[in-house]
Image (cartoon, rainbow, N blue to C red):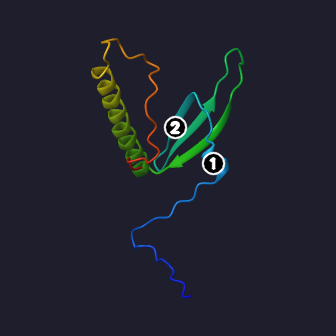
Amino acid sequence: MSEKKQEALPNELSIELSEEVAEGVYSNLAIITHSNTEFVLDFVRVMPGIPKAKVKSRIILTPEHAARLLAALQDNLNRFEAQLKAAAANNPNGEQVPKDFPYPLDLHPKGEA
């Protein structure tokens, strides 16, 4: 039986996601600093009543990638708001959609960063 290896297309990128990274890190505070050559995003978890917090994750980006991240976040926020408005318009009772509306999780991101 012959085995065929599937070759990746020249512009195709294979991305691996380990179980540990897939679990994610909860953060409720982001601190952004920058220099001439990079942006640093520190994600922090602050707990009520505890005066000390730790940086849980740090992402370092070039200015170009920071701009792309900003555009991708804006695109995704716009789509989220459109879904929320559509859900409110389709609400049969005419009630306001609560702020904690459980939006559908799209596990296939369309934005680019």
The residue positioned farthest toward the left in the image shown: 89
**Residue situated in front as seen by the camera: 93 or 66:** 93
The residue located at (56%, 88%) in the rendering is 1
* Residue occupying image coordinates x 40% and y 39%: 73
Please tell me whether residue 38 is drawn above or below residue 32 in the rendered image: below
Q: Position of residue 42 (x, y in %)?
A: 58, 37
Left or right, 61 with reference to 10 = right
Q: Name the residue type under label 1.
A: Val
Q: Which numbered dot is residue 21?
A: 1
Graded by Cα atoms within 10 Å as few (under 14), some (14 to 19) or many (20 or more), the crowding at tag 1 reads few
**Separation of marks 1 and 2 at Cα, in angstroms:** 24 Å
| Quadrant hosting residue 98 | top left
> Which residue in the protein does label 2 denote?
33
Mark 2 belongs to which amino acid? Thr
Residue 113: image tag: none
Depth check, front residue: 83 or 77: 83
- 42 or 98, nearer to the observer: 98
The percent coordinates of residue 50 (x first, y second) are: 72, 18
Percent position of residue 64, x then y: 39, 51
Viewer-nearest of discs 1 and 2: 1
Q: Is there CB contact under 8 Å for labels 1 and 2?
A: no
Q: Residue at x 44, y 22 (%)?
A: 101
